[in-house]
């Protein structure tokens, strides 16, 4: 191994943002996730792929304790953010979700103005000392979500009045406004047309300069385009986790191979 490669390996190992070990999820009697071990790297886009019902959304929701809101759901195992157990009793889930933000499949802007949608998180987390600072965060977040130019003259209009693709970028701006360390996205483009999809993909590529992004997608082309790491789930198991190029060109597990070649759907 040459020096550069050794150095790269060392960097990779210190850049673990979230580490999951032996994660099990039950919904009542249903065993939805089995012994999931994975390290999510910082400043990297990680794609979760796999057939419907395999546990992608379930696992994504474990990463910011969104499953806490589902009564029948029980999570076991250990998930650490920067080495600290996020299920520790001392961790406040609201604070955690500011650090590990989430964007859902269906755009869900609050019934508030465009401005207030983005300002919401910074306000509750006290990120701005005054109106000028808040204005700055709102503008920066909307620029970051590639939406500023389209909305800068209508910030006081309702977020729900935007097109679907604009609403999804507004939700991304809202998530980015709290300066998360990790952004979880569950099929963020499934309600979008190809143009809006490509805008969101460009944005994801840009966001990874600042933090780590985890995206669930049914589109293997999308996973290949936007991610550097891919995890393939099947029937509640994490079957294979590797560099995206390797998953798509030389998968090691026959189940991954079947899925990417279209035999398991
Ligand atoms: N709230 C819930 N209550 C009970 N069972 C659930 C709940 N949410 C998910 N499940 C079950 O857990 C398993 C994993 O579901 P999950 O939603 O994580 O799959 P997914 O991979 O995201 O699928 P899709 O691609 O269709 O979104 C499925 O069998 C599902 O029926
Ligand atoms: Mg899902």
Image: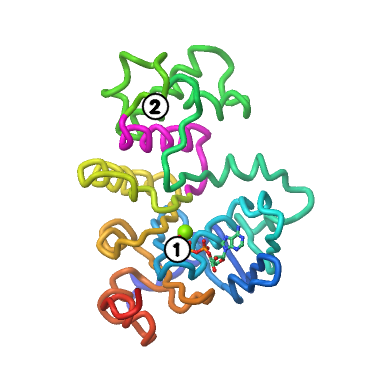
Q: Residues within 10 Å of mark 1 (few under 14, many from 20)?
A: few
Between residues 34 and 182, which one lies in front from this camera angle? Answer: 34
Mark 1 or mark 2, which is nearer to you?
2
Residue at the spot 42% in from the left edge and 64% down from the top edge:
48
Based on the displayed image, in which of its 4 quarters is residue 128 positioned? top right
Q: Residue at x 44, y 23 (%)?
A: 138
Tag 2 or tag 1, which sits nearer the N-term? 1
Percent position of residue 63, x then y:
58, 56
Name the residue at 30% across, 56% down. 226
Q: In the rendered structure, find residue 140 and report the number of the disc placed on it.
A: 2
> Which is nearer the eye, 64 or 135?
64
Query: Residue sitting at 46 percent across and 36 percent down?
Result: 108
Q: Quadrant of the N terminus?
A: bottom left
What element does badge 2 sit on?
Answer: helix
From this view, report whether residue 170 is shown above or below residue 229: above
* Left or right of residue 58: residue 204: left
Query: What is the secondary structure assignment of the residue under circle 1?
Result: helix
Q: Main secondary structure of the magenta part?
A: helix
Measured as percent of width and height from the top left, residue 144 is found at 35, 34
Mark-to-mark CA distance, 1 and 2: 30 Å
In the rendered image, the residue lying farthest to the left is 195
Determine which residue is flagged by label 1: 11
What segment is highlighted magenta in the picture? 163-183
Q: Is residue 155 left or right of residue 99?
A: left
Compared with residue 262, is residue 205 higher up or lower down, i.e. above or below?
A: above
């Amino acid at each position: 191994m040459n020096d550069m490669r050794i150095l790269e390996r060392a960097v990779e190992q210190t850049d673990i943002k979230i580490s999951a070990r032996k994660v099990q999820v039950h919904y009542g009697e249903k065993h939805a996730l089995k012994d999931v071990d994975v390290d999510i790297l910082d400043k990297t886009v990680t794609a979760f792929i796999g057939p419907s019902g395999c546990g992608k959304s379930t696992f994504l929701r474990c990463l910011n304790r969104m499953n806490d809101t589902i009564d029948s759901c029980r999570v076991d195992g250990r998930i650490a953010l920067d080495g600290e157990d996020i299920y520790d009793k001392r961790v406040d889930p609201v604070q955690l979700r500011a650090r590990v933000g989430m964007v859902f499949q269906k755009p869900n802007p609050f019934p508030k103005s465009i401005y207030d949608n983005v300002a919401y998180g910074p306000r509750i987390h006290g990120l701005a000392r005054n109106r000028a600072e808040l204005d700055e965060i709102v503008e920066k977040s909307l620029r970051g979500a590639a939406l500023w130019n389209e909305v800068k003259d209508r910030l006081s209009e309702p977020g729900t009045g935007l097109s679907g693709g604009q609403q999804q970028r507004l939700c991304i701006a809202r998530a980015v406004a709290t300066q998360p360390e990790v952004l979880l996205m569950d099929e963020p483009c499934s309600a979008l047309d190809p143009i809006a999809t490509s805008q969101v993909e460009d944005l994801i590529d840009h966001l990874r300069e600042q933090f780590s992004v985890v995206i669930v997608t049914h589109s293997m082309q999308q996973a290949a385009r936007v991610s550097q790491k891919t995890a393939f789930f099947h029937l509640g198991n994490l079957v294979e986790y590797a560099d995206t190029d390797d998953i798509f060109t030389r998968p090691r597990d026959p189940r991954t191979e079947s899925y990417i070649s279209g035999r398991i759907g």
